[in-house]
Amino acid sequence: MRFFLVLIFSLSLAFGGLLKDEIAPQMQAKIDSVLEILQNKTLDEVAVSEKIFELLDGNFDFNLMARLSLGWSQWRNLNTKDQERFTEHFIAKLKRSLVQKLRLYSDEIMVIKETREVRIGNATRIFLITELIGQEKNYPIVYKFYETRDGEWMIYDVDVLEVSLIQTYRSQFDGYLNNHTLDDLIVWLDKDEEIE
């Protein structure tokens, strides 16, 4: 999954939500910049992580990703305090996972193929279709953007090899919460291991 994790970092470098027409050019520029950081052998892992995390929150709506990952039925059963606890631990887990995989980055490059408008119910989404060019094969990655109330676009999900990050987490969490408490899930979120 190293290609997925590298590209999440790549697309996190926007300064905030993007205007619709800026998505492809801004993202390609940011991707190129972060790949340069990752290729800089004079920086240790901590320095690389710090540089990237200074900009990480800008383009991803991590709060929305946390809610979508838990699922509406589970989310609405939590009180405000537990929603905040889950969100905090989920975001920390996601970011920690990304940092741990940075050292696996090699010399792949990524190209943006197209942006596509998609209607989902009454809402319009923009899918940024990208491809990671590997040494042995290429990997499709799709970043899904929604429009905020301010008219900017932010990422709420990522498909890797046609598998949704959000749906993967949701299916893990649903199964886990059938037999465990939220406190158990938070304990797992604080660990660096796969969910049982």
Image (spheres, rainbow, N blue to C red):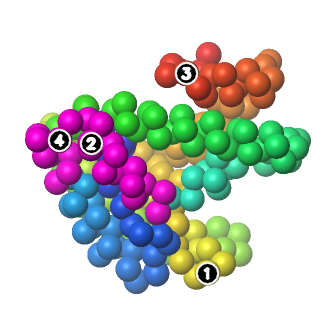
Inter-mark Cα distance, 2 to 4: 6 Å
- What label sits on residue 10 in the rendered view? none
Task: Say which residue appears at 27% left-offset and 60% top-offset.
Answer: 31
Give the image quarter of residue 111.
bottom left
In terms of secondary structure, where does tag 1 sit?
loop
Residue 93 highlighted magenta (yes or no): no
User: Residues at badges 2 and 3 in contact (C-beta under 8 Å)?
Assistant: no
In terms of secondary structure, where does tag 4 sit?
loop
- What label sits on residue 47 in the rendered view? 2
Q: Specify which label sits upstream in the sequence, 4 or 3.
A: 4
User: Residues at badges 2 and 4 in contact (C-beta under 8 Å)?
Assistant: yes
Q: Answer left or right for 145 relative to 36.
A: right
Q: Which amino acid does label 3 sit on?
A: Lys
Q: What residue sits right under mark 3 in the picture?
A: 191
Query: What x and y, as percent, mark residue 132?
Result: 25, 50
Task: Say which residue appears at 39% left-offset and 58% top-offset.
Answer: 55
Q: Residues within 10 Å of mark 1 (few under 14, many from 20)?
A: few
Q: What residue sits right under mark 4 in the picture?
A: 43
Q: Which amino acid does label 1 sit on?
A: Asp
Q: Quadrant of the N terminus?
A: top left
Please tell me whether residue 145 is drawn above or below residue 78 in the rendered image. below
Inter-mark Cα distance, 2 to 1: 33 Å
Query: What x and y, as percent, mark residue 150?
Result: 61, 81
Bounds of the magenta segment: 36-58
- What label sits on residue 150 in the rendered view? 1
Q: What residue type is labelled 4?
A: Leu
Q: Specify which label sits upstream in the sequence, 2 or 1.
A: 2
Inter-mark Cα distance, 3 to 1: 36 Å
Give the image quarter of residue 146.
bottom right
Q: Which amino acid does label 2 sit on?
A: Ala
In terms of secondary structure, where does tag 3 sit?
loop
Residue 46 highlighted magenta (yes or no): yes
